[in-house]
Image: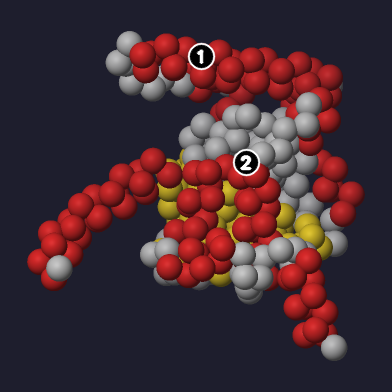
C-alpha cells in the first residue's frame, strides 16, 4: 500500500521516466558526502538555474542542504518570473530527495514563507529552521541561512526591501555594462560584486556578519557553521570556529562540499567546468586511438 502511494506521488511530481532521468544516469558523476548550496533566488532574472542544473547533474551526494533564499518570494510577489529552468531545479531537488539523498531545506529571508512549514516536508525534502551536519570526521557544523545576524533586516524590514531593489538594479546595470564590454572585446567584470566589496567592507558589514555567526555557532557548542545570505563564498577560522559560507547561484556560482573523507571545500562552477573541459581534452586522443 505504502509502495503504491509512493509510485503515485512520484508520478504526480512528474519525475518518473522524465527525459532528464536517463541523462542523469549517463552523466559522469563526482560523488560528495554532502553538498551545501544557498541563495539560488529562483524567480529572479539573476538566478543561474542552468549552471546549477549542470552542477547537480554532475555531482551527487548523500546529504544536500538548501541553505536559504532558494526561491525569491520577495521578487515573485512583485513580479511573477518562473521560466522552465527554474521549474527543472525544483524537480531535480525533489527527485534527488526521493532517490534517497537526505535533503534538508533551511529557509532564508527571501523564502521566509517556508518558515511557517518547519518540521513539514515538500515531497521528501524536510524543512528546518536550522540544522546540524556532522562530517565524516565527526566535526559538528551548525547550518543556518544567516539573516538573523543581519542587523539591517533585524532592525527595519523596509530598509532591507530598499536594499534588495538597489541590488536588482546593479545586477541589471551589470548585465548591460558587460554586454557592452563583450562587444568591445573586454572580459567580464562584476559591478555588483565590486560595489558589494566596496560598500560593505567600508561598513565592516561582512566581517561583523562572519564574526557574529561564528560566535553563535561556538555558543551552541559546534565546531563550525555553514551559512549563506551575504553571497560571499568563504571558508576560514574565526577565533577557533570554522566559518563556511557556500556563496550563491546569482554571481559566484559556488557550493560548499564535503568529500567522502570529510574534507570540506568551496567549489566554483567556473573552475569545475574548466577542469571538466581539460579532462575531456585529455581523453580525446584516447578516443581517437580506439576509434
Ligand atoms: Mn538571504
Q: Residue at x 39, y 41 (%)?
A: 270
Q: Is residue 134 above or below residue 79?
A: below
Given the current orientation, which residue lies at the most extreme right position?
A: 116
The image position of residue 41, as x and y in percent, is 66, 37
* Front residue of 267 and 208: 267
The image position of residue 16, as x and y in percent, is 66, 70
Q: Are marks 2 and 1 in contact (CB under 8 Å)?
A: no
The image position of residue 239, as x and y in percent, is 53, 43
Q: Is residue 210 above or below residue 280?
A: above
Count of marks, rendered view: 2
Quarter of the image that includes the N terminus: bottom right
Disc 2: CA contacts within 10 A as few (<14), some (14-19) or many (>=20): many
Residue 29 seen anywhere in this rendered image of the structure: no
Q: Is residue 47 above or below residue 116?
A: above
- What secondary structure is found at the residue carrying circle 1? helix
Q: Of marks 2 and 1, which one's residue comes earlier in the chain?
A: 2
The image position of residue 290, as x and y in percent, is 13, 70
Ligand 1 closer than 8 Å to the CB at disc 2?
Answer: no
Quarter of the image that includes the C terminus: bottom left
Q: CA distance from mark 2 to mark 1?
A: 21 Å
Q: Using the image, tell me which numbered label, if any, was put on residue 244.
A: none
Left or right relative to 188: residue 240 = right
Where is mark 1, residue-wise? 176
Left or right relative to 230: residue 50 = left
Residue 75's image quarter?
A: top right
Nearest to viewer (mark 2 / mark 1) = 1
- What secondary structure is found at the residue carrying circle 2? loop
Where is mark 2, residue-wise? 40
Q: Residue at x 54, y 50 (%)?
A: 53
Residue 90 seen anywhere in this rendered image of the structure: yes
Q: Residue at x 51, y 14 (%)?
A: 176
Q: Residue at x 73, y 51 (%)?
A: 106
Amino acid at each position: 500500500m505504502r509502495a503504491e502511494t509512493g509510485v503515485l506521488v512520484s508520478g504526480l511530481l512528474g519525475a518518473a521516466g522524465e527525459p532528464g532521468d536517463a541523462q542523469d544516469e549517463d552523466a559522469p558523476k563526482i560523488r560528495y558526502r554532502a553538498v551545501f548550496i544557498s541563495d539560488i533566488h529562483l524567480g529572479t532574472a539573476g538566478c543561474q538555474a542552468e549552471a546549477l542544473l549542470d552542477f547537480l547533474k554532475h555531482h551527487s551526494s548523500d546529504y544536500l542542504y538548501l541553505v536559504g533564499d532558494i526561491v525569491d518570494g520577495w521578487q515573485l510577489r512583485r513580479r511573477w518570473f518562473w521560466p522552465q529552468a527554474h521549474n527543472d531545479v525544483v524537480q531535480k531537488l525533489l527527485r534527488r530527495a526521493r532517490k534517497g539523498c537526505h535533503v534538508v531545506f533551511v529557509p532564508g529571508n527571501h523564502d521566509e514563507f517556508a518558515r511557517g512549514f518547519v518540521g513539514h516536508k515538500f515531497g521528501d525534502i524536510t524543512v528546518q529552521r536550522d540544522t546540524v551536519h556532522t562530517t565524516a570526521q565527526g566535526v559538528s557544523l551548525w547550518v543556518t541561512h544567516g539573516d538573523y545576524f543581519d542587523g539591517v533586516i533585524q532592525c527595519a524590514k523596509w530598509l532591507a526591501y530598499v536594499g534588495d531593489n538597489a541590488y536588482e538594479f546593479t545586477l541589471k546595470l551589470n548585465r548591460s555594462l558587460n554586454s557592452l564590454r563583450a562587444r568591445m572585446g573586454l572580459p567580464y567584470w562584476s559591478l555588483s560584486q565590486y560595489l558589494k566589496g566596496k560598500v560593505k567592507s567600508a561598513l565592516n558589514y561582512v566581517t561583523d556578519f562572519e564574526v557574529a555567526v561564528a560566535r553563535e555557532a561556538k555558543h551552541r557548542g559546534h565546531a563550525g557553521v555553514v551559512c549563506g545570505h551575504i553571497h560571499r563564498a568563504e571558508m576560514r577560522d574565526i577565533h577557533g570556529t570554522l566559518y563556511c559560507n557556500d556563496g550563491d547561484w546569482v554571481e559566484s556560482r559556488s557550493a560548499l562540499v564535503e568529500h567522502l573523507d570529510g574534507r570540506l571545500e568551496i567549489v566554483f562552477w567556473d573552475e569545475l567546468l574548466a577542469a571538466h573541459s581539460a579532462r575531456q581534452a585529455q581523453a580525446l586522443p584516447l578516443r581517437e586511438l580506439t576509434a
